[in-house]
Amino acid sequence: QVQLVESGGGLVQPGGSLRLSCAASGSLFSIMTMGWYRQAPGKERDLVATVTSGGRTNYVNSVKGRFTISRDNAKNTVYLQMNNLKPEDTAVYYCNAVIDILPHHDYWGQGTQVTVSS
């Protein structure tokens, strides 16, 4: 069982920055693909960014050039640096972990609120 704990959310003005963190329990972090998803009120949960165990990253088009996902295997932690935030980035952000080996169990954090407003 893997537990994910997010932190770093909050209220920020448009154009501001936040860094989200997600700490994973256990010893499987180095063989997990980590991701950040977000869910705005009344909408589905959508992918924001992922980073594979090998360090390859992927972003949804709307955050390219503004958000950076990274991981620190020594700390069992994945980060999402969010710059130039926009009101449409407002959502609950969730951390996700998928174990690379079969049967690819996946896990979710409890979510952290990000609100971009003046």
Image (cartoon, helix red, strand yellow):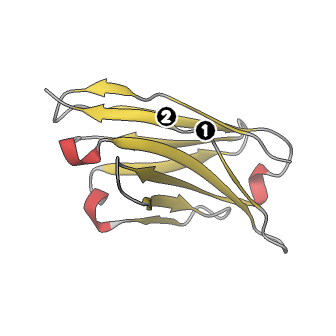
Image coords of residue 97 (percent x, y): 67, 55
Q: Is 43 situated left or right of 26 in this image?
A: left
Q: Position of residue 60 (x, y in %)?
A: 36, 65
> Can the viewer see residue 42?
yes
Estimate how packed mark 2 is, as few (under 14), some (14 to 19) or many (20 or more) residues with alpha carbons within 10 Å: many
Check if mark 2's residue and mark 1's residue have beta carbons within 8 Å. Answer: yes
| Tag 1: amino acid | Gln
Q: CA distance from mark 2 to mark 1?
A: 7 Å
**In this rendering, is residue 15 above or below 64?**
above
Residue 16 position in % (x across, y down): 22, 31
- Under tag 1, what secondary structure? loop
| Residue located at (55% from left, 66% from top) | 56
**Residue 86 visible:** no
Rendering quarter of residue 75: top right
Q: Amino acid at mark 2?
A: Thr
Residue located 28% across and 46% down the image: 89
Residue position for label 1: 110
Mark 2 lies on residue:
112
Q: Quadrant of the C terminus?
A: top left
Q: Toward the viewer: 117 or 55?
A: 117
**Residue at 63% over, 42% down:** 109
For mark 1, does the 10 Å Cα neighbourhood hold few (<14), some (14 to 19), or many (20 or more) residues? some
In the rendered image, residue 21, in percent from the top left (x then y), is placed at 54, 35
